[in-house]
Amino acid sequence: MSTTNKINHPLLSVSNLSWYAGNSQILSDISFQVPVGSFTGMLGPNGAGKSSLLRCLYRYISPANGQIKFNNQDIRSLSNQEFARNVAVVLQHTPQQFNLSVFDVVALGLIPHKTMFSNNSKDDLALIKTAIEQVGLSDKTQVDFETLSGGEKQRVMIARAIVQRPQLLLMDEPTSHLDVKYQIQIMELAKSLGITIIASFHDINLASALCDQLLVLKKGSLQAVGQPKEVITEVMLSNVFDVCTKVSQHPQHHAPHVTYFYGYNSSDRAANQGDDK
Ligand SMILES: Nc1ncnc2c1ncn2[C@@H]1O[C@H](COP(=O)(O)OP(=O)(O)OP(=O)(O)O)[C@@H](O)[C@H]1O
């Protein structure tokens, strides 16, 4: 696992983005850049705006203000097919896929690359088979997708994204249904694809281990942007997540590792922080 910061030109550039749901401002003046080939993690407590920001990035909702540029082009100027060829999305809840096998669902990833009525080539079939192998589901290739467990469905959606061969992979809490082995394995697999990834996480230690860059959101505002070692601090965790922690260095990858303390509330922490001064 490498957490080297990759300073390249931005694949994605977000400037002064705001979004409202009705009269409520959900995202406020958000600006950041995502270098080509980097893995960016989005952190923040429940309701901080992670999904809303990702929805803006995959064009499900349109920001009220600001700009999102992909390869220096406004994302609104890309055709649907062009956008789908370049950007894949894996969501927390998998969409229903009636009467489709695992193979069929993974094959859907090829659609943006196909003309109407074209059949799958030998190369396409090999790509689908390899992607299914990569997520550890070769024995379920012909199984009905709807009969799979939540975690297995999530792995199928990752395989579909692999087949789509996007430049940018957006993932909204992709590991929420996965057991700990697959949480690590799937995120490492995503990272090994070498494409640019933006993923929201609730597991701060997993994000710290894998990400080159972290964005921290609170109440719709960006609180911090930077490498895990710059962003994951006891003060940030207290201010943003309202938890009492010790941040040390992970023995293997040396990125920050968070240990949580129990039985504290906000006023205890405020008092402790006062003692340190
Ligand atoms: N379409 C909508 N209409 C009204 N409110 C919305 C809408 N979408 C999001 N919100 C509100 O915006 C806030 C941010 O929600 P969002 O789902 O983006 O947060 P999140 O950081 O992904 O949270 P979680 O970690 O709980 O998934 C929440 O208060 C949510 O209720």
Image (spheres, rainbow, N blue to C red):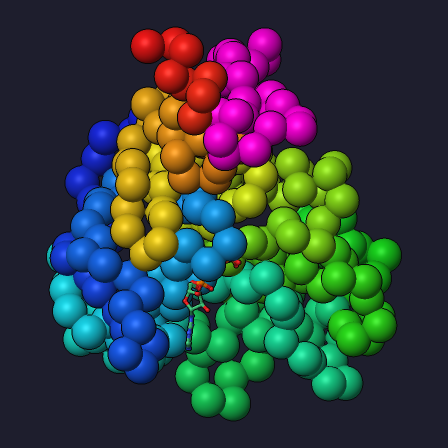
Left or right of 269 on screen, residue 26: left
Q: Position of residue 139 (x, y in %)?
A: 85, 57
Nearest the camera: 213 or 107? 213
Look at 38% across and 30% down and name the residue there: 236
Left or right of 207 on screen, residue 78: left
Evaluate whether residue 69 shows in this view: no
Is 252 magenta? The answer is yes
Q: Position of residue 221 (x, y in %)?
A: 28, 51
Image quarter (top left, top right, bottom left or bottom right) of the C terminus: top left
Look at 30% across and 73% down and name the residue there: 24
Exactly how many numbered labels are in the figure?
0
Evaluate whether residue 34 shows in this view: yes
Which span is picked out in magenta?
244-269
Q: Position of residue 154 (x, y in %)?
A: 67, 59
Q: Position of residue 14 (x, y in %)?
A: 20, 55
Look at 41% across and 11% down and name the residue there: 275
Task: Say if 190 sits above or below 155 in the image.
Answer: above
Displayed-image quarter of ligand 1: bottom left
Q: Residue furthest bottom?
A: 117
Nearest the camera: 19 or 188? 19
Which quadrant holds residue 223?
Answer: top left
Look at 39% across and 9% down and name the residue there: 276
Is 112 magenta? The answer is no
Nearest the camera: 71 or 268? 268
Left or right of 18 on screen, residue 114: right
Task: Say if 155 sits above or below 114 in the image.
Answer: above
